[in-house]
Image (cartoon, helix red, strand yellow):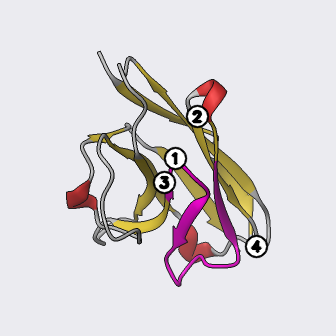
Amino acid sequence: WAQLVESGGGSVQTGGSLKLSCVATGYETPNKMMGWFRQAPGKEREGLATIYTDGVYTYYADSVQGRFTISQDTTKNTIYLQMNSLKPEDTALYYCAARRNTRWPRKLYGAEEYDDWGQGTRVIVSS
């Protein structure tokens, strides 16, 4: 069955970096759109970055623009989220999500546009 598995979370100090990975397995065809989200305690799930897997189109939330980078390795069915200059407010449970069909126009979409979700990986940033 299709599933998404995240890894790479951990604890870092302010200003540190982490790289999250999300492996997609069991899909008959590649997903057209994948994204990273996060949810902090008591807050709504926040969309961070989207990548359209048929090209080089990436989109970011203002809160992470310039600090986070989404990328993919199609040979490994994996997407990544490189997170630099981490802040305590980045502390959250991070999820990857997949959408089987593309969505137009190309932009950062909310959680309701995605079909599948991983179980999440926790990121803690201490001051």
x 29%, y 45%: residue:
101
Disc 3 target residue: 52
Q: Secondary structure at mark 4?
A: loop
Q: Is tag 2's residue or tag 1's residue first in the polypeptide sequence?
A: 1
Disc 1 target residue: 54
Which one is nearer the viewer's eye here, 77 or 125?
A: 77
Residue 58 image position (x, y, % from top left): 56, 64
Q: Please, what is the three-letter code of the amino acid marked with disc 2?
A: Thr
Tell me the distance, in whole angstroms, between the alpha carbons under discs 4 and 1: 29 Å
Q: Please, what is the three-letter code of the amino acid marked with disc 3?
A: Tyr
Q: Which mark is residue 78?
A: 2
Determine whether, in the image, residue 100 is placed left or right of residue 73: left
Q: Which mark is residue 36?
A: none
Residue 99 image position (x, y, % from top left): 32, 45
Q: Residues within 10 Å of mark 1 (few under 14, many from 20)?
A: few
Q: Secondary structure at mark 3?
A: strand
Disc 1 to disc 3: CB gap under 8 Å? yes
Q: Is tag 4's residue or tag 2's residue first in the polypeptide sequence?
A: 2
The span shown in magenta is 51-71
Q: Residues within 10 Å of mark 3 (few under 14, many from 20)?
A: many
Determine whether, in the image, residue 85 is placed left or right of residue 48: right
Q: Which mark is residue 85?
A: 4
Residue 17 image position (x, y, % from top left): 77, 59
Q: The N terminus is located in which quarter?
A: top left
